[in-house]
Amino acid sequence: MKILITGGAGYIGSHTIIEILENTNWEVISIDNYSSSSEKTYQRIEKITGKKVTYYNIDLTDLSLTEKVFAENTDIAGIIHFAAFKSVPESVENPLMYYHNNLNSLINILKCQAKYNIPNLIFSSSCSVYGNLTELPVTETTPLNKPESPYAYTKQIGEKMVDDFIKTNANLKAISLRYFNPVGAHKSGLNGEVPIARPNNLVPYITQTAIGKLEQLTVFGGDYATNDGTCIRDYVHVCDIASAHVKALQKLVDDKNFEQHSIINLGTGVGVSVLEAIKAFEKVSNQKLNYKIGPRRAGDVEAIYANNTKAKELINWTPKFNIDEMMLSAWLWEQNLNKM
């Protein structure tokens, strides 16, 4: 079975390729334009798995170039669509860039899915679609609130696009996976998150501060209505997220009666505050972090964590890693990355 992964050189995409190559007999092809990643990722994948990946350097907003990949690979059985810009603050600063990239790339993937009759699609969505919430944990039926950033809005629109598209193509199916906060790295320490510029996500910010790349970590907001005043998130190990993609795609392949478009939360169900995450890192790394409490950041929600019952029941997915293991794997990766 041949699988197309878009954004395959990225953080979650590369871990999903590794999960597929290590645990299935599927063939993988990848598309990435390296706007927030590097072609070197495929060398790391090969070092871990011993297998080469066929990959294309293509911008998915270009339909003609995107379609060439499908024309060359007419036997694709499924698409896992990761490729998207994902920085909340960057989307606030440059909304048009996010609308152009995230929506046009998805439109082109859906056009090709229909034209080449590719039966299965996994769409990379986000817990950011829920906005600020008054009731936690969130389930898939929790009403979507006003998105707090253009990035979050592209994921709301993306889910709607997938849903409307799938309804008009009776032979196609899709699952939209709403991730909470992917963190950590592969157990080998040979693959993880590689921020191109200054990190926007907490964990690489922590590890870069600990190793000395950054002088100080800023915690954005210490006056939220939470247990310690900092934002609460549902951190999930990236390898657990990768495993969920394989299980979701396998479900679509195996279960011919599965609903046409299903939406599934991917979270541990445990809310962890920013300060709790910092303390977990300090414990497992034996490092004292230099951090300060700064002002709130535009686009951030106060608290969010998942009810993951649907993922357990529909795709037999249960996260394996806790916050200490997430932080330890991220620290191992940062130390190895510093030697590269």
Image (tube, rainbow, N blue to C red):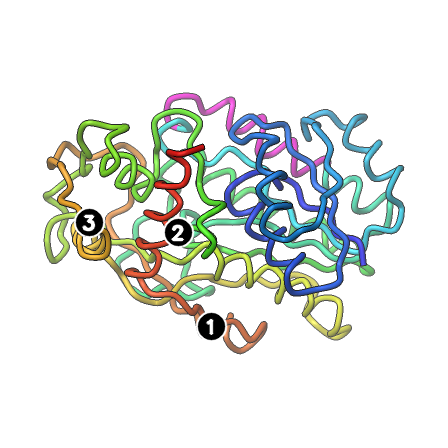
What residue is shown with label 2?
184
Q: Which mark is residue 112?
A: none
Q: Nearer the viewer, residue 97 or 24?
A: 24
Q: Which type of secondary structure does the marked residue at label 1 adopt?
A: loop
The magenta span reads: 92-108
Three-letter amino acid code at the position of disc 2: Gly
Above or below residue 110? Residue 92 is above
Name the residue rendered at 69%, 67% in the picture.
Answer: 250
Mark 1 vs mark 2, foreground winner is 2
Q: Residues within 10 Å of mark 1 (few under 14, many from 20)?
A: some
Name the residue rendered at 44%, 68% in the picture.
Answer: 319
**Quadrant of the rendered image containing residue 325:** bottom left
Q: Position of residue 42 (x, y in %)?
A: 63, 39
Three-letter amino acid code at the position of disc 1: Thr
> How far is the residue under mark 1 from the one under mark 3?
24 Å
Q: Residues within 10 Å of mark 3 (few under 14, many from 20)?
A: many
Above or below residue 62? Residue 247 is below
Q: Nearer the viewer, residue 167 or 94?
A: 94
What residue is shown with label 3?
278
Q: Are marks 3 and 2 in contact (CB under 8 Å)?
A: no
Q: Which type of secondary structure does the marked residue at label 3 adopt?
A: helix
